[in-house]
Image: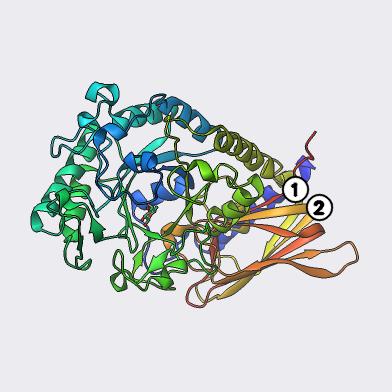
Amino acid sequence: MKKNISHLLLFCFLADAAISIIGCTKKADVPAPYGAVPTARQLAWHDMQMYAFIHFTTTTYRDVEWGYGDAAPDEFQPTRFNPRQWVEVLKAAGMKGVILTAKHHDGFCLWPSQLTDYSVAYSSWMEGKGDVVGALSKEAARAGLKFGVYLSPWDRHDLRYGTPAYVNYFRGQLRELLTQYGPIFEVWQDGANGGDGYYGGLCERRIIDNRTYYDWATTDTLIRELQPMACIFSDGGPDTRWCGNESGSVGDPNWATLNRDKYAPGRADNRGLQHGDVGGSHWVPAEVDVSIRPGWFYHQREDDRVKSVAQLMDIYYTSVGRGSNLILNVPPTKDGLIHPTDSARLIAFGKALQREFSRPLKTNAIKSLRASSVLRGFPARLVLDADNQTFWGTNDDVREATLTMTLHRPTTLYCLRLREPIRLGQRIDHFCVEALAPSGEWKLVAEGTTIGPQRILRLSEGTEASAIRLTVGSAEACPLLSEVQFFLPPEADE
Ligand code: FUL
């Protein structure tokens, strides 16, 4: 079998060489990028795929979802606080990073901010020497996880909220967070903004104009200056966008491109965020935020409502599998630990993920690979290497192309991962996979719309194929693909 694949590769290599001889050794031209393309910081973000969210503050002790802003700092008492336990569990689940609510809407700061008396420094917990942001960022770095911060723009505690002085305070807090805790991969700006709150004891309702109040452009410049590789998340970017719901899925289609100026954090109509905009003005990929429990904060009453491994797997397929990143929330208990049910579930999910993709179809199982169109220098075999920089290209005027992969023997296939070379933009708007059944019939086994950075999908059950035909199409530009990887059904559990 090895011999066959090496013959195939040799043939492809000679064919490429022949093309370059016939073509007077002209170097292959890289296709022109189509539409908006990702920045270096967004490319690094796409590699993250799945990370954790931690919602933790005085709100945990009040047993509510939105702290009013009146909890005394002493209420924050995580007597068994153990961020190493958090990080170990998250790592076992396959998370590549963690984002902490450094400050949620209640305004309490989990680091000893110099700019307020509403922080861990004013709590009797650890005699005012505690620093949740510092401790978690250190543990994350030790374990090789990236670290990010959620700093709620809405602050229900601070008297200044609603005035320009508050915006300066908010920026000062960002400066502290972005200069004292090492590299930050994402800054999470929430869309919930304004309403009733404590506000220094005035207990009133404050409404701000979310298009103008925060002057986000100035804040974003500050973030860029302090942490150039940090992606800024909000309802509408600038770097990454909300997926438009909190139930664990992004739309299909899911375009990483967005007409960004149409959106603003907290805007009432954010329905378009589930899909993005085909040919949108900017690259603003979606992030799917969802909690392992019904709430974002820990509530004992939800101990029996932790999502199952099967539910988490479905979420994985409808988020990471549709080319967005998944941020899965895991709320620590009042003790400051990840609850045993959540931790067991996360560890089992990590194992299930490994198992799911444990049997890639090897290249030596492939007898031949034929493409309906090949751009010189970008042969179809480049979808089989493990390198996402290389890709199969089709000629410039092509809008639909097929790739036919013949296998040495009929094989039962389980799922499939496709990737576009997104450095050159997102192009594909429809695809389908057909399998040549032993009966000699071509059967449709999967189909979808967009691919983008990644598409992972299960094939119709029991797909036995002696050949596979993949069709990809794009209305506006020639399709390009950097990966086509099939997986065989995972081994049954012992
Ligand atoms: C929402 C917030 O209001 C929730 O409390 C939570 O932080 C969630 C991730 O974002 O908009």
Image location of residue 172, percent across then percent down: 14, 44
Residue 412 got which mark? Answer: 2
Residue 384 in sight in this render: no
Image location of residue 130, percent across then percent down: 27, 26
Q: Judge from the rendering whether residue 406 lies leftward or rightward of residue 62; answer left or right.
A: right
Circle 1 Cα neighbour tier, 10 Å, few/some/many (<14 / 14–19 / ≥20):
some
Q: Are marks 2 and 1 in contact (CB under 8 Å)?
A: yes
Res 210 → quadrant? bottom left
Amino acid type indicated by mark 2: Thr
Q: In this view, does 224 lie above or below 322?
A: above
Question: Label 1, on which residue?
Answer: 488
Q: Residue at x 18, y 46 (%)?
A: 225
Image location of residue 259, percent across then percent down: 34, 72
Disc 1: residue Cβ within 8 A of ligand 1's nearest atom: no
Secondary element at image label 1:
loop
Query: Quarter for ligand 1?
Result: bottom left
Residue that extends furthest to the right in the rendered view of this protein: 439
Identify which residue, 90 or 127, lies in the foreground.
127
| Colour theme | rainbow
Secondary element at image label 2:
strand
